[in-house]
Amino acid sequence: MSDEGNPQQAPTAHKLQTPIGMHDILPDDHEFFTFIKKVVRHRARQCGFRRITTPILEATEVFQRGIGDATDIVDKEMYTFTDKGDRSMTLKPEGTAGVVRSYIEHGMKELPQPVQLYYIEPHFRYDKPQKGRYRQFWQFGIEIIGETDPALDAQIIDLANRINEDLGIAHLFQIQINNIGCPKCRTKYKEELVNFYIGKERSLCENCQDRLHKNPLRLLDCKAEDCRILAELAPKFEQYRCPTCVEFHTKLKGYLDELKIEYVENPKLVRGLDYYTGTVFEFWDKTEGAQNAIGGGGRYDGLTELMGGQPTPAVGYAAGLERIIGHMHKEGIKVPSKDDLHIFVAQLGDDAKKKCLTLLNQLRERGIKAVGALGKGSMKAQMRLADKFKVPYTLIMGITEVREGVVIVRNMQKGQQRPVPFDEVVEEVVKLIGEENLDKYSPGELLY
Ligand SMILES: [Zn+2]
Ligand SMILES: [Zn+2]
């Protein structure tokens, strides 16, 4: 039975699924997400970055002004809708515009500059779903706002590289850098580019024909064969770069050399967003190139002003968590799993179940990860469950044990067991598990 053409009627037969291009983050995936978040948090904190979270949606204008109307993102890929107050809202397609909106709104220019912020959040783009590319995807980003110096750009690249090293994937990537100039030299270059392409429009792909007058720089990184050939012949930006931009770029390269960071200069690298000025960089997959870039960033000195703030220089980087995880899987990288349980508690009889609840609490308070079979199951069924949980030890309490005030401690691997007095069993388990393996929780510590 089909319900097509009849929106009134709820579909009856088809299975409910995640929306196209979106995915569930299942517990096994979360071990990777948690690991990456910890690495990012740790490295960012070491460098003085503080975390920021902006709303998942913003007024559409935030992205139109920030990212630029002529970009693919704003033009085709945004999840935009009109809310009940008749406002145009958009699920954020990237992180920087929202952060800058927040910087302006909260007067962060009054804080000591530069302001260093990082975020780890989901983003949304109505893109063609393909390998490693989702419509809801997670990105982490780092931003340095309020100061300009090539040393800051070098620091951002260094931090991004260190995060990749900690994740075990840095060797898979090549750092591509370029300087796309300031408004002064770039405007002149754009004119030259348009002049070059005029009369050659028919050789361009449909996309590029459309972009030629709106965003000519994007023609340089088009993947279409004919566009690539033309891009090779097009005038190079180097000839138009003004002395200030040349000096900035030379200094950046000097700092990267000082930090012993390997990079490749790529004069065709422009990035897909309008707000970039000066330095741009990307981490390219060594075998698949730009197609499988893991992240990128650059300087966006004009963005704050575009969004209604005072002119404020800034530089940032963002990378995709799903892409990172894809690479980690390909490399066979394992992350520490903290979800493994220490103890299973099996019980039989009403009194045992009562005792079992207290015992579970006592175990957990001590940092022992424990579950109990609290439903109605035979002792045999419970032991089978304990096997499935792959716990090293099971605690068993039946009617006799409750009467005698003991708990049976069973070593699951050896199949050996012995009774331990109820009052001593928690410390006995601690000894068996090892103090260093406990999952200690102290609300005074930073746990976010
Ligand atoms: Zn310039
Ligand atoms: Zn093209």
Image (cartoon, grey):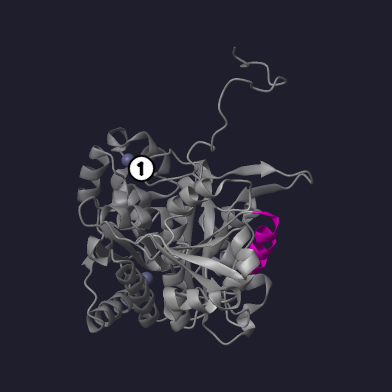
The image shows residue 393 at horizontal and vertical percentages of 45, 64
Q: Quadrant of the C terminus?
A: bottom right
Residue at x 41% of width, y 46% of height:
133
Q: Which residue is mark 1?
A: 131
> SS at mark 1?
loop
Pick out the residue farthest to the top: 1
Q: Quadrant of the N terminus?
A: top right
Question: Hey, which quadrant is residue 16 in on the image?
Answer: top right
Residue at x 25% of width, y 48% of height:
231
Which residue range is magenta in the image? 349-358
* Mark 1 beta carbon near ligand 2 (under 8 Å): no
Pick out the residue farthest to the right: 85
Q: How many discs mark residues in the rendered view? A: 1
Residue 112 painted magenta: no
Quadrant assignment for ligand 1: bottom left
Give whichever of 134, 114 is nearer the camera: 134
Residue at x 51% of width, y 82% of height:
114
- Residue 308 visible at all: no
- Residue 191 visible at all: yes
Residue 234 as seen in the image, left or right of residue 96: left
Give whichever of 119, 425 is nearer the camera: 425
Disc 1 residue type (three-letter): Lys
Instruction: Check the image and report above or below for 144 versus 140.
Output: below
The image shows residue 88 at horizontal and vertical percentages of 69, 46
Instruction: Check the image and report above or below for 86 versus 47.
Output: above
The image shows residue 82 at horizontal and vertical percentages of 70, 42
Give whichever of 40, 237 is nearer the camera: 40
